[in-house]
Image: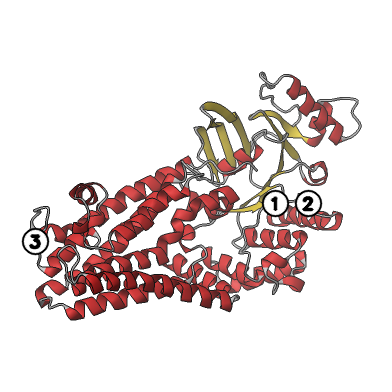
Amino acid sequence: MIRTYALLAWTWTRAAAQYPLSFALMTAGGLVVGGLDVAVIWVIFANTGELAGFGLTEVMFLYGASQLAFALADLLFGNVDKISQHIVAGTLDVMLIRPASPFVQVAADRFTPHRLGRSIQAGAVLAAGLAGLDVPLGRVWMVPVMVVSGIVIFAALFTLGGALQFLLTAAPEVANAFTYGGATLTQYPLSVYDTRIVRGMTFALPLAFVNWQPGLYVLGRPDPLGLPSWTGLLSPAAALALAAVAALAWRAGIRRYRSTGS
Amino acid sequence: MIEADRVGRTFTVRRRVVHAVRDLSFRVGAGEFVACLGPNGAGKSTTIKMLTGILTPTSGRVQVAGLDPSRRRTALARRIGVVFGQRTTLWWDLPLRDSLELVRLLYKVDRKVFRERLDEMCDLLDLGGFLATPVRQLSLGQRMRGDITAALLHDPAVLVLDEPTIGLDVVSKAEVRDFLRRLNAERGTTVLLTTHDLGDVERLCRRVLLIDHGRLAFDGTVDGLRATAPGRASIEDVVAELYLRSRTTPRTPPAPRPAPDGPSATA
């Protein structure tokens, strides 16, 4: 699986290198978009000094953690929610006759490292936020765990979005609402939202486990919903549960695949 | 080598259930060269897709090279080669040589075996002149030869081709046909192809499967097929008459009929 992914990703990277100007522009574009996000945070803090009870470094930490997880999940698996293009063009047929998982082939399809720019930018914000905080060593270990859990959660969302497209070929945007929407929702401390939304993100679609719950644990802050502090430690479990659901949905999707006319 | 046992596939189109293939049974033995004919929309491609693991049958049982295609898809992929006339299996932006190298790595073909195989194919299909050309710049004839090479690098026991000669000029068509005939005769590769080009059938195939309205309408030799419409001069006319006959009786397609003098199924 990993070997096949690396092989295809390397192939696409070489193919993309045929168009160096396009590559440079896409990388620059990614950095500008990411930079605007950070600018918004700066503008907020230039005016208020805190956001829903969280200081600048804490918000940078929460933002960096969720955006790093999302950028890496998008880099590695973001193409899975473009499966409807492969269904319509008939290229999924070609993937299904090769001795490799169609999931890996779709995920690695048109792999382009320019999305790495976004990850580096998010990683820098996360590092800057952490540097400004005084997180005790006994809780710092949770930071890489939450980033990896976040990657798994976003990857599972991309997969669910892809699986949905076996049913709704014509509506790939529905999936984007959850993936890109999830990334946007988790940019800020969840306490800025209505508690009903936060509950939904904790118990239904586990977006709160990307950076909010584990973030509260790292920051040593109580949960506004009153959940115990160890809730944040459940991130890996929540991520795995969502990944299992996504894997089942994907399998069901492949079995229901209808191909195209010819 | 290929076994279909009462295979069916339905699609739900606007809440109506459409039977693309129903109750299709046939066997293809090792080393056979079989053509699958049928009017547009008869279920040929659906059948091919069930045999290659792309589609899961809704009823019945399929076995190819000893495997259930939809359950053991990746294992099957190592034993069969598939060529689509209408779309390439190669990577659009890569030179043909790199595309083939990637296929080699995906199928885990030994580097030395690959070299020998590629040299042989270069000889037979005259690939040498365009190995360095990106696939998107190849002519259709060159692309088809590249696709056939890619499908055969892992030396599969079965080669399945969906309309391999579609759109090819007379010379390219002859080259592809000649190559397939030699592959079947010299390596003993089992070949199953779908086509609308009856030249393919007459020049290559000993056996014809005619699929119509998702059912097997004829299974036998080319001569046997001719005998079903006596008085018709060319095979084209025979097939045209068979297609027309079934069109006038769309709800009751002809029942599967044993071939008068077809080869008996050999496993």
**Residue under label 1:** B85
Q: Disc 2, disc 1: CB below 8 Å?
A: yes
- Specify the quadrant of the image occupied by residue A209: bottom left
Q: Amino acid at mark 3?
A: Pro
Answer yes or no: are tags 2 and 1 on the same subunit: yes
Please identify the quadrant where the N terminus of chain A is shown.
bottom left
**Residue under label 2:** B167
Count residues near mark 1 (Cα–Cα under 10 Å), then give few for <14, some for 14-19, many for 20+.
many
Residue B267 appears in the picture as rendered: no
Identify the chain of the residue marked 1, using the numbered disc in the image.
Answer: B
**Residue under label 3:** A222
Count residues near mark 2 (Cα–Cα under 10 Å), then give few for <14, some for 14-19, many for 20+.
few
Count residues near mark 3 (Cα–Cα under 10 Å), then give few for <14, some for 14-19, many for 20+.
few
The residue that appears at 78% across and 22% down in the rendered structure is B245
Q: Amino acid at mark 1?
A: Gly
Question: Vertical placement of B133 versus B24: above or below?
Answer: below
Answer yes or no: are tags 3 and 1 on the same subunit: no
Front residue of B201 and A241: A241
> As drawn, is B45 to the left or to the right of B8?
right
Separation of marks 2 and 1 at Cα, in angstroms: 8 Å
Where does residue B184 sit, x and y in percent of width and height?
Answer: 71, 52
Front residue of A195 and B257: A195
Q: Amino acid at mark 2?
A: Gly
Q: Disc 3, disc 1: CB below 8 Å?
A: no
Identify the chain of the residue marked 3, using the numbered disc in the image.
Answer: A
Residue A94 appears in the picture as rendered: yes
Please identify the quadrant where the C terminus of chain A is shown.
top right
> As drawn, is B215 to the left or to the right of A37?
right
Identify the chain of the residue marked 2, using the numbered disc in the image.
Answer: B
Report helix, strand or loop for mark 3. loop
